[in-house]
Structures are given as C-alpha cells and as structure tokens.
C-alpha cells in the first residue's frame, strides 16, 4: 500500500527537479547569448522606484554634494543609467543609480570595486552562477527595501500581539469542543467571523507593505543562496549569516509563510487564502519579519548593499564589454583635466576630442558647432570616472571633484521664477560649492543668456572673475565673443569652428585653441531661405557694430 505513495512522491520530486534544471538551462542560454551579442532587453523600471535608495541616503546626509537633480537632468544621466543598467534585481538597479550620483572625491572603495568588475568580466563560470541566483530574485517596482535601514516606526504594526491572540482563538475553540461541543462551535464560528472581518478591513492598509516585505524576504534568501559560491570575494555573505545575520533566518521562514499559495494558479489557492484569513498569517508574518530586521538592522543593510554592489558590478562589466574602447582614469591633485580621444557616452558615432583643460576655460563658437556636446561629454565622463571607474577615452587624468552644471535652464511657472531668476539660482549652486572650498568642476553653457546684452556680459565677466580666484575648476561655453576679450588674461580660450561649402555650413566638431572668430547665425538665415533684404540688413548691422562698437538706428539706414 505504501509503494504507490512512495512512487508518487518520487515522481513529484523528480518533476520539480526537472523543472528547476530546465528553467536554469533556459536562463543560462539567455545569459550567454546576451554576453555574446552584447545586447539585452531591459526590464522597465520607474525612475521613482530606482532612485529610492539614493533618496533615502541623501535625506540623511548632513552634506550632500553628489550629482544633484539639475546636473543629472542637464547631462541626460537617466539615459546614461539606462544604457548600462544590466542589473538583474531592483537592489542592483537602486545601488547602481546611487553609485552614479554619489561622487566621493576621496575615492573610497573605488579600487576594491575595480577588482570586482575585473573578476566578473573574466570569470565566466563564476559570473553565470551569480547571474542565475540574482535573476531568481528579479525586479519589483516600488518595493523601497532600503527604507528598512531607517524607518522602522513606519513599518511596524500597532498592537501586533492582538493578531497573535486572535489567531489562537480558532485553535482554542477546537480544544473547547472536547469540553462543550456547543460552546466550542459557537466560539469557533465567532472567531472565524471576527478574524475574517479584521483580515479584510486591515488587508488594504498592509497591501503596500506586504508588497515590500515579501521582496525583503526574497533578498535575504538570495543572500543565503550566494553563500554557496566558494570564492574569497563571496565570503562576505557567509560571514553575515554566521554573525549578526543568524537572526535573519526568521525572515526567510516567515517570507515563505507569506508566499504560501500566492499566485500559483493551483487548485488549492482558495484553501490557502482561507487558511491565511483564519490565522491572520499575513499580519503575524509581516510583523515577525519587521522585528527580525529591526533587531538585525546592520546585517540586513550589509546584505542588501553587498547584493547591490555585486549586481551593479556585473552591469558595469557588461557595459564595458559593449564599448568599442574605454580607459581607467588616473587621479592627481593638480587642478587640471587631461584626456585623449574622449567620446560622448550617448552618441552612436561620436566625434572624439583631446584636450588639456586648466582651472579656467572659456569655449566659444557658432551655433550647432559642438560646444554643448563637448562640455556635456567632459562632465559625464568626469562623473563616470569617479563612480564606475570607467571613461570613454584613450586616457583620462583629473583631480577628484564634485561635478555641477548649469545648462538647460527653464523658467518655473509654479514657483514664479522667470528664466533669468532660474538661471542665477542655478549658478548660485556653483558659487556655494566654491565658497565651501569643496573640490569642484563646474560646467556652464551660455552663461546668463536670460538678460540684456550689456548686463549679461558685465555680470558674466564678474562671475567668471570670482570663480577664477576661488577653489574649483570651471568650464564655460558662450556665444559672447566679447567675453574672450574681457577675460583673455584669466581664462584659456578654446573654440569650435565651421566652414561654408557650396552654400552649406559644415562642422568638424573638433575643439581648437584660441577664441572663435566666426559667426554663422546670419548665414543660416540665408541657407534657410529668409528674404534677402533681411539677411543683407543683418550683415550691415553686424559689420557696423564690429567696426565701431555702436549699433546703428534702424530708421537711419
């Protein structure tokens, strides 16, 4: 009689084992194809979800001078992040996002991370084992699992002991039946009704937290799976669970309780749902997990960040593999930035540039000549150098510094700020960093273009002079050739140029020494077919001003 049951049990075990093996084989095939083709299909993630770890860190930092929101938006860093986000988990995504924003001029831990990037790039077998484990954790938007590092009061259930007492009522009622069947049945029926009412009334309140806490439990399980990898670099996971992290085993257990019968599509889902209702398992398990994390806060954080660092490291190794060239940056104390054949990370066919940039640089040039693209490329690579130890260039040397920009300024209707007010507020960030004597490289595109010519040039020159005598490097791009004359003794001049051939304006997108001596705005009007009277008049006015530095009145022409 027992043999059929034994055979059935063996069949189920074999079936589960086969499914796991075939699933892993499919995953492994996909992983190998991604690394061979250097392409992958990104999992869609909301920026508010991905940025949660960064926000949690920033809100608790006494001084934060990482990549602020204006700089991030100016440089299109969301696109840069998406281009390298080959992470398998939400923990990895959040860690990588924070890593790109959390510039530390002390460069703490950069060399250790470089060793991990190299290991993940070169050891195919090890990398594949890790990817299989991480892919099982997967991604979940809005889990905000790093909030459990701090906000325990936000997650705890009030009067949690009441749920335990209520869960014991059905058991007590069954025991009561042996003494009085009628009383026991009444007690059981009452307890079932009470627990059902409490479950459904409070379930919605806990829904978001359950969404988060089940992912927390999965993170702990992932950490335990990583302890199986025998490599010195992975000993950190074993150390966590041998020490304070022993108590996190409770998280794994109650996480499994929470996952019983959920979204399996099986015939027993309804039964499991009733079982959870009767014994209020969601509330009890949730509270037990939170208590375990509160007690073992440091172990949980260390585990979370170790998984995030590992996942991000594989993404960076993958990103490097996809590049046609890159270099490891060199860091010096001198306020100078030097590079050879630097490329913009977001352009498919970028024109490369080589430069040695000193403390103060002014870049001039015509419209669309490449000024903005150039300074954005320098700024992005300066961020990548200090965060992921990777630069799109043949070589790169810089002083470790915070990076701040003032480029794509927009007026703010909600705050009542005009374009000019928004612009001077943006520039004030740079001034404040310099006044705080922080190492900084600032990038300004079209300084103070939101006001009249006389005041724009006067104020721009004054700000440029102040920046030149205070701590930090500054790179400014402008159309105002007058600034090259005023600041010629203080700022090193570079320019971008164009040529006109067969009625077309052609750009080489290469930076050249000295100030710009060409203009193309009026020529572009001609090429686009503006009336000849307009372009002739524009040329006469420009020539008159160039000759005598005085504007002609229109009615005098």
Image (cartoon, rainbow, N blue to C red):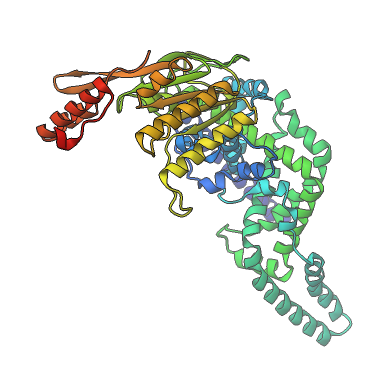
The count of marks equals: 0
Instruction: Provide residue 486's location: percent of width, then percent of height.
Output: 42, 20
**Left or right of 423: which side holds 505?**
left
- Report the front residue among 326 and 39: 326
Quadrant hosting residue 324: top left
Tell me what residue is drawn at x 53 percent, y 40 percent: 69
Which residue is rendered at x = 46% and y = 49% of the image?
417
Screen quadrant of the C terminus: top left
Residue 510 image offset from top left, x and y in percent: 35, 16
Residue sitting at x 42%, y 32%:
447
Q: Quadrant of residue 507?
A: top left
Q: Say if residue 228 shows up in the picture.
A: yes
Residue 473 shown left or right of residue 333 in the figure: left
The residue most toward the right is 179
Q: Position of residue 449 (x, y in %)?
A: 38, 35
Image position of 118 (left or right of 556): right
Q: Residue furthest front?
A: 556
Quadrant of residue 384 in the image? Answer: top right
Q: Is residue 151 above or below residue 192?
A: above
Q: Nearer the viewer, residue 271 or 40?
A: 40
**Image position, residue 77 (x, y; %):** 48, 35
Quadrant placement of the N terminus: bottom right
| Residue situated in front as seen by the camera: 67 or 225 | 67
Say whether residue 130 is visible: no
């Amino acid at each position: 009689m027992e043999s059929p049951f034994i055979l059935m049990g063996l069949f189920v075990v074999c079936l589960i084992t086969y499914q796991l093996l075939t699933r892993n084989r499919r995953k492994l095939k996909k992983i190998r194809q991604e690394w061979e083709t250097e392409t992958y299909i990104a999992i869609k993630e909301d920026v508010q979800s991905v940025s949660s770890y960064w926000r949690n860190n920033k809100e608790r930092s006494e001084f934060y001078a990482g990549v602020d929101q204006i700089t991030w938006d100016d440089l299109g860093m969301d696109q840069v992040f998406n281009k390298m986000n080959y992470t398998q988990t939400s923990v990895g995504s959040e860690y990588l996002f924070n890593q790109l924003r959390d510039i530390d001029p002390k460069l703490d831990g950069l060399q250790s991370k470089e060793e991990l990037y190299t290991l993940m790039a070169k050891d195919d077998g090890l990398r594949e084992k890790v990817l299989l484990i991480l892919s099982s954790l997967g991604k979940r938007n809005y889990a905000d699992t790093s909030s459990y590092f701090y906000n325990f009061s936000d997650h705890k259930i009030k009067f949690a002991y009441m749920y335990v007492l209520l869960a014991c009522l059905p058991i007590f009622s069954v025991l009561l039946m042996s003494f009085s069947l009628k009383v026991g049945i009444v007690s059981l029926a009452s307890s079932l009704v009470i627990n059902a009412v409490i479950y459904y009334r409070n379930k919605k309140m806990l829904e978001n937290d359950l969404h988060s806490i089940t992912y927390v439990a999965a993170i702990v399980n992932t950490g335990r799976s990583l302890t199986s990898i025998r490599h010195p670099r992975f000993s950190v996971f074993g150390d966590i669970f041998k020490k304070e992290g022993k108590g996190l085993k409770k998280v794994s257990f109650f996480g499994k309780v929470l996952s019983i019968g959920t979204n399996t599509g099986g015939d027993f889902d309804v039964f499991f749902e009733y079982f959870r209702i009767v014994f209020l398992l969601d509330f009890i398990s949730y509270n037990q997990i939170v208590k375990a994390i509160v007690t073992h806060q440091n172990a949980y954080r260390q585990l979370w960040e170790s998984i995030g660092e590992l996942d991000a490291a594989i993404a960076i190794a993958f990103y490097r593999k996809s590049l046609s060239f890159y270099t490891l940056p060199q860091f010096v104390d001198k306020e100078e930035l030097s590079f050879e054949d630097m490329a913009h990370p977001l352009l498919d066919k970028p024109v490369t540039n080589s430069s040695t940039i000193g403390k103060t640089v002014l870049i001039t040039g015509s419209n669309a000549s490449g000024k903005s693209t150039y300074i954005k490329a320098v700024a992005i690579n300066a961020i990548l150098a200090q965060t992921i130890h990777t630069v799109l260039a043949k070589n790169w040397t810089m002083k470790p510094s915070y990076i701040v920009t003032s480029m794509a300024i927009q007026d703010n209707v909600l705050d009542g700020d005009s374009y000019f007010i928004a612009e001077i507020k943006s520039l004030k960030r740079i001034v404040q960093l310099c006044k705080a004597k922080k190492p900084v490289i600032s990038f300004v595109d079209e300084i103070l273009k939101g006001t009249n010519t006389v005041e724009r040039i006067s104020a721009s020159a004054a700000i440029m002079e102040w920046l030149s005598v205070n701590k930090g490097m500054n790179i400014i791009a402008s159309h105002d050739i007058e600034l090259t004359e005023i600041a010629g003794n203080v700022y090193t001049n570079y320019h971008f140029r164009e040529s006109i051939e067969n009625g077309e304006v052609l750009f080489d997108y290469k930076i050249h020494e000295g100030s710009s001596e060409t203009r193309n705005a009026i020529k572009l009007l001609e090429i686009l077919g503006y009336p000849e009277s307009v372009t002739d008049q524009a040329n006469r006015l420009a020539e008159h001003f160039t000759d005598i530095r005085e504007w002609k009145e229109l009615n005098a022409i």
